Amino acid sequence: QVQVVESGGGLVQSGGSLRLSCAASGRSFVGYATGWFRQAPGKEREFVAAIRWNGYTTTYADSVKGRFTISRDKAKSTVYLQMNSLKPEDTAVYYCAAQGELRVGLSTEIGSYDYWGQGTQVTVSS
């Protein structure tokens, strides 16, 4: 059974930092991309960042560029999202998602990801 589990969320003051972790298990994800998405109350789920299996190719939403960094530890099969200079508008449930098959390019689309975690809450106070 495939499992995607996020951790590391919490409450932080504006300007602070958090690091989210995502661990996927239950099948091989070697070669496939992983993404982070978020959903704020009353809003649609939106793309945050994604990374190829090689760990060298990444893409970010404009709203987080320069503040968030996505990375991968292949040995631990874990993907991280380092979030710095957090703002109240970053408050959301953050979801990790893994692709289950090879796709062209590094997708920012929800429908391109096959396995999803339950989410972890990030709250940024002003």
Image: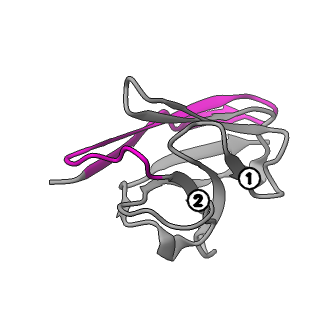
Give the vertical position of 5 relative to 46 (above or below): above
- Give residue 24's mark: none
Instruction: Kindly state the secondary structure of the residue where label 2 is placed.
Output: strand
Q: How many marks?
A: 2
36 part of magenta stretch = no
Residue sitting farthest toward the left: 1
In the image, is 67 to the left or to the right of 53? Answer: right
Give residue 103's position: percent from left, percent from top: 50, 67
Q: From which residue to which does the magenta span run?
A: 3-32
Q: Quadrant of residue 41?
A: bottom right
Cα separation, mark 1 vs mark 2, equals 13 Å
Give residue 122's position: percent from left, percent from top: 58, 45
What colour scheme was applied to this rendering of the protein?
one colour
Residue kind at label 2, given as amino acid type: Arg
Q: Residues within 10 Å of mark 1 (few under 14, many from 20)?
A: many
- Residue at 51% over, 38% down: 9
Q: Nearer the viewer, residue 45 or 125?
A: 45
Instruction: Tell me the mark number nearer the camera, choosing from 1 and 2.
Output: 1
Which callout, 1 or 2, points at the residue further toward the start of the chain? 2
Name the residue beneath numbered marker 2. 38
Instruction: Kindly state the secondary structure of the residue where label 1 is placed.
Output: strand
Give residue 19's position: percent from left, percent from top: 58, 30
Residue kind at label 1, given as amino acid type: Tyr
